[in-house]
Amino acid sequence: MSQDLQLTRRQIFEELTKIVDPEIGVSIMELELIDKVDIEQGKVNVDLHLTSPFCPAVFGFKIAQDVKDNICNVEGIEDVKVNVSNHFMAEAINKQVNESKSPKSASTSTTKESAASNPGQDPNNQNTD
């Protein structure tokens, strides 16, 4: 494994450690909810399970979305796919999370939209005088 990949992997796991199960109040890493993390050319696939097959769907969605959002914070990561398994709402959670934009791409598209609606204006200049 290259040093860059090792560093990226370490940064991903640091981000995952920050995510706390909203029902239990413990890190998802301490709860060992992450089953697998694959990294290839800026794309990350994460397999995870929840604490129970009947964990409230809203908590399952929050955990899965936090996994995607936090990993997107790692430099060099372009895309994250989350696969929740062994949960009664896994299919719906996966669909909603994986179709959502990452915070990084959402802010980029907002900047592009702003530039398109204000041609000739610097999108970083927020002066509205």
Image (spheres, helix red, strand yellow):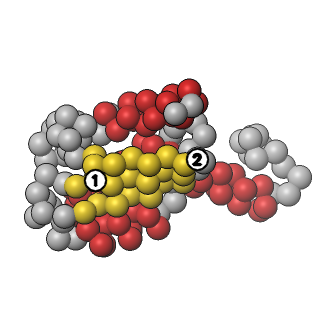
Residue 94, numbered label: none
Which residue type does callout 1 highlight? Leu
Q: Residue at x 22, y 46 (%)?
A: 33
Mark 1 neighbour class, 10 Å CA radius: few under 14, some 14 to 19, many 20 or more: many
> Number of marks in the image?
2
Q: Left or right: where does residue 50 sit relative to residue 110? A: left
Q: Left or right: where does residue 112 sit relative to residue 1? A: right
Mark 2 neighbour class, 10 Å CA radius: few under 14, some 14 to 19, many 20 or more: some
Q: Secondary structure at mark 2?
A: loop
Residue that numbered label 1 is attached to: 48
Q: Left or right: where does residue 113 sit relative to residue 33? A: right
Query: Quarter of the image containing the C terminus?
Result: top right
Closer to the camera in the image, 89 or 112: 89
Residue placed furthest toward the right: 120
Work out whether 98 lies above or below 78: below
Instruction: Say whether residue 62 is visible.
Output: no
Work out whether 105 lies above or below 92: above
Residue that numbered label 2 is attached to: 42
State which quadrant residue 13 falls in. Answer: top left
Work out whether 90 lies above or below 35: below
Which residue type does callout 2 highlight? Gly
Closer to the camera in the image, 40 or 11: 40
Q: CA distance from mark 1 to mark 2?
A: 19 Å
Work out whether 120 lies above or below 19: below
Q: Earlier in the sequence, mark 1 or mark 2?
A: 2
Q: Position of residue 42 (x, y in %)?
A: 58, 47
Q: Residue at x 39, y 62 (%)?
A: 97
Q: Secondary structure at mark 1?
A: strand
State which quadrant residue 65 falls in. Answer: bottom left
Q: Position of residue 117 (x, y in %)?
A: 77, 62
Q: Residue at x 43, y 30 (%)?
A: 10
Q: Position of residue 30 (x, y in %)?
A: 19, 34
